Amino acid sequence: DLLAKLCPAPVQVSETKESQDATLSSWTYTYQGTAHDVLWEHITDHSGRNVEFYSPFCSIVQSSGTGKSRCIDELSKEHLVVPMCLAAGPNGFPASDKALYAYFQTSTSDPEVRVEAFLCALFDVLDTTIQSEYDDPSVPLAAWFRHRMTAGQTFLSQNEKRISFYNQVVEKAQTLARKGVVKTVDTPAPGSSQPPSPPRMTFKDCPTAREIVQRLRATCRSKTQSELEEPLVLAFDEAHTLSDEGLTGLSSVIQHLRRSLRAIGKHVFSVFLSTTGKIAQFTAPPDADPSNRVSSRTLSLVPPFTALGWGHLAKVLPLEPTFEQIGFDYQVWLGRPLFGTRYVNLAVDPRMDEVMQFATSKILNVREGLPPFLTRDQETAILSHRLPIAFLSWAHAQDERKQVENHMRVCVTVREDFISLATVNSSEPILSEAASNIMSKPSFNAPKALSELLTGFSIHAGNCGELAAMLLVTLARDKVVHAKKQLAHPGFIPVIDFLKSLFASGPVAEGDASIFLAKPSVYNTDSAKDTTLEEAFQDDFLHFNHFIKRGAQGFKFAAKPAAKSAATSAATSSPPTLPTLDRLLGFFLRNAALMGANSQRAFDFITFTCRGYTVRKSAMSIIIYQVKNDSSYSSNAHVYLFDAMDPFKLGIFGPDDNTTIPVIRIVMALAGKVALKCVQTQRKGKFTAYDIWASGLGAATYPIVGDQEQIWGDILRTSQSGWESIYNGQEKAKELKKAMTPSAGDDDASWAWLKTAAGKTADGEEDIVMDVV
């Protein structure tokens, strides 16, 4: 409930000395991406429209480690930004501006007076500082001020000039607050139906904040010898500390700050950031807003900003990468910048273990280690980083917000009602592997956690048992990964080991034979006709630790057209098509399996296989799964279902692909009677396929079910009972949001993380992983 009591910020992850050093060093890692430019577009687009919007401010809503603070810092290199960190203590970076934190925590003065005095003092000290210190117009004012406020900062403290700056601000604000205050009444400005509100108070012998801003702007114009048209940005980092505990709705400090900013007008725009605070602290839904003009819909609030992008630091791959080249050193850069920049700057050994421990603490929102008991929110977070967990509706928006605020779920869009979010378990292999480590502990009961989550009615259960099937496949994969037998390449599991973990190794019903001795139901060469399944996949590997749910139907990846002359371009009606499997390699590269879009025909999910230790198109194939949760699909195999799972007809293989690696097609008839068999039609076709019909959801078919058939049955019973709209905003913002859901769509923005060198493969053929995007 958005009107619930505002709670203190959740616990922050502790930082060792080595961890602090790594965090500080990561801040200097070369910034990549355009989030700061898109944020500036967001600011300028809304700052001048004060007739439509109540106050010139917005919040940045995103989970931890996505680069919110770094985005503001990058923005301050080009535009005048006043950075403020209101953290309570040394629990993060940038360090706290302690004087400001103490000032806003003071409860002895009227919060309205406190806010107005602060703004007057801030603008006055900023004006004085620029007047007295900035004297070289060849250095941009924004860059000069950023350097002044950040140079020499440490994990524990800001630099001396910044400390002195805010000490002056606080001292002046306290002096103003002790002066006589003249209250004023809101009155509409002549000729405007919805003007900026006038100041509610003034201090004796002191101009208003709006008047000081005009003076500041005049100073900036004089000093830079240019017109200053763009707004000054106030950035409040760790802004959750501005909330007043015990109040409902927006805190009084933030409420008065919004009102004062409205009085100042379009020349100052404020941004509120928080890694742990509640979204509603800054932008409550209109119906709960304390402003009558907002609650009556006469005015609107500026939409929160979420488009920080994803995978900007992904490393460029060779055209035919080896397993070693796409291992941990590559995976750590896929997703938010937090883990890669930390990993590369850690001095401890082994770095991988420290990063994985850190990722575990971030998923669970704990200081360190595993708590003795997991909360429902923690269990949801663990499962969400493995399976495509979707929340049902705005009625459960609070649960969804908690996942963003505390457990690393990604917010793509805050909807217009400011209540519900469009969120995803965005693909991030490091977090998924950390979740896998947690799930491997005896204390974590994955099917029980999923069953309880589904019966809580807050997440979408699906209608065909897909979540149950994907959890079976996930647990089978984990059993191989966490077995005592060490893998030659960690995370890359032999196909046969996986299948023996998933399915019973021998016959499960009378008349059945072991699936591992089965021969293909379809074959494309005579030599493949008599090869058993176990023989066919001896050298093949899987690589996945989570699922990416597709939003796009089918597979229609378009290649970027090569440069053409004007005449050639005019004669070409459409760009060439990139063979689908080339881009589908991306799922294998980023350690992911694919779940089909809603209503996807013929299959529900796919895992990708590779023959040998080098990823190339000619070595790739698939295991394709269809799930049935209907008792009419039982122990007798329905051959037509396999016929529909034709990789050529589905567009997974291109029409000219020469498929030498067999396909495995699996139908999981979860509601049927126990059976495990292979279809033995033995007919010639365009590809080779081994077709497995697995019926029932018991230990006889799936040994990993063990003695928990009742719990798995509960999951199945629960299951029986326009995706692109989340990418809203300006075009560049849409692209960054699509990048935050990697591989979910067909366009280049969804695949911006995959970077490859241009050219031909070692054998001279056009066997590419993917065009550079």
Image (spheres, grey):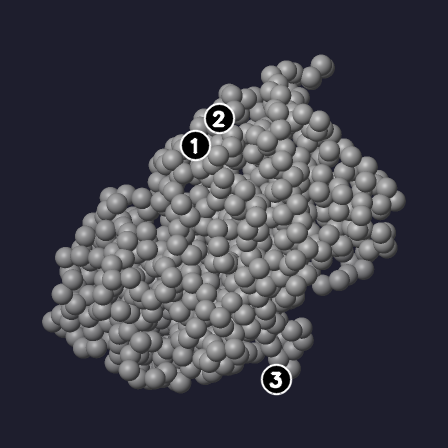
Image height of 437 relative to 307, above or below? below
Image point (62%, 42%), residue name: 171
Q: Which amino acid type is marked by label 2?
A: Pro
Number of other residues with Cα within 10 Å of mark 3, as a class: few under 14, some 14 to 19, many 20 or more: few
The answer to whether residue 310 is seen in the rendering is no
Element type at marker 1? loop
Q: Nearer the viewer, residue 83 or 97?
A: 97
Q: Which amino acid type is marked by label 1?
A: Gly
Name the residue that disc number 2 marks: 290
Image point (81%, 37%), residue name: 218
Distance between mark 1 and mark 2 Cα atoms: 8 Å
- Report the number of discs: 3
Mark positioned earlier in the residue sequence (2 or 3): 2
Comparing labels 1 and 3, the label whose residue is closer to the camera? 1
| Residue 584 pos. (x, y %) | 50, 65
Distance between mark 2 and mark 3 Cα atoms: 68 Å
Image height of 499 relative to 625, above or below? below
Image point (45%, 80%), residue name: 350
| Residue 734 pos. (x, y %) | 59, 47
Element type at marker 2? loop
Q: Which mark is residue 450?
A: none
Q: Which amino acid type is marked by label 3?
A: Asp
Q: Is residue 88 left or right of residue 397?
A: right
Mark positioned earlier in the residue sequence (1 or 2): 1
Q: Where does the N terminus fall, quadrant-wise?
A: top left
Comparing labels 2 and 3, the label whose residue is closer to the camera? 2
Q: Which mark is residue 249?
A: 1
Q: Nearer the viewer, residue 600 or 200?
A: 200
Q: Nearer the viewer, residue 724 or 690?
A: 724
The answer to whether residue 100 is seen in the rendering is yes
Q: Which mark is residue 763?
A: 3
Badges 1 and 3: C-beta atoms under 8 Å apart?
Answer: no
